[in-house]
Every structure is written in C-alpha cells, then in structure tokens.
Image (tube, rainbow, N blue to C red):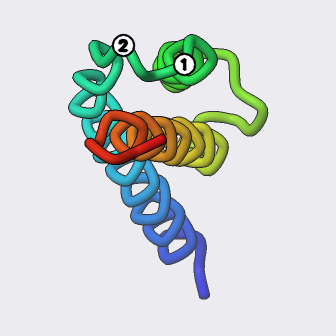
Amino acid sequence: MDTTVWLTLATVLAVSLAIAAAVLLVRVFKARRLLLDAGIPLRDKALFWVAVAYTLSPVDLIPDPVYLDDIGVLLLALRALQAAATAAREGKEPGAA
C-alpha cells in the first residue's frame, strides 16, 4: 500500500471520528433541558458543562485528529445525565417513597 492509500484511510477515520464527536455534542446540548429539572444533582449538571468545555477545548488527552477522548467524555456526560434524570423521575412519581 502506498502513502496515498494510508493518507486516505487516515483522513476517512479522522472525519468519521469528528462526525461522531459532533453528533454526541449535539445530543449533549439537547440533553441540557434536563439541567432545568430541579431534581438533577449539581454534580451531574457540572459534568455536562465540563464535557462541553473539554470537547470544545484545544487541550486534549489524545491529539485532535483522534476524537476518542472527546467521544468518551461526551458519552460519560450523557450517561450521567440520563441516570440522574431517571432517578429524579422515579422520585417524583406518585407512590414513590
């Protein structure tokens, strides 16, 4: 395989990872409405903003052509928000103790 094939594969991989990070960032912003709920703990609200700041920040654990660290942080924020929203929703249901 020559150099152009490797460069093409690297470019396709980098673009794919950038698209995945962008999609997750959009999902995180859509999930911000959960932050308006008073039942969401401050820790989870802060994690949301940390994930957004980390994704937009030029400082990364892994250099920017590889967005795996950004994707991981965004997934962590989404899971934490989902878990907090589920717990808050269960606490507000009638019949919940």
Element class at badge 2: loop
The image shows residue 22 at horizontal and vertical percentages of 33, 40
Answer whether residue 54 is visible to the viewer in this image.
no
Left or right: 36 in relation to 52: left
Left or right: 27 in relation to 60: left
Label placed on residue 78: none
Answer whether residue 26 is visible to the viewer in this image.
yes
Residue where numbered disc 2 is placed: 38
What is the tally of numbered marks visible in this picture? 2
Position of 26 relative to 60 (above/below): below
Q: Residue at x 66, y 43 (%)?
A: 69
Element class at badge 1: loop
Residue where numbered disc 1 is placed: 41
Amino acid type assigned to the residue bearing label 1 in the image: Pro
Position of 38 relative to 4 (above/below): above
The image shows residue 4 at horizontal and vertical percentages of 49, 70
Q: Residue furthest bottom?
A: 1
C-alpha gap between disc 2 and disc 1: 8 Å
Q: Residue at x 28, y 33 (%)?
A: 31
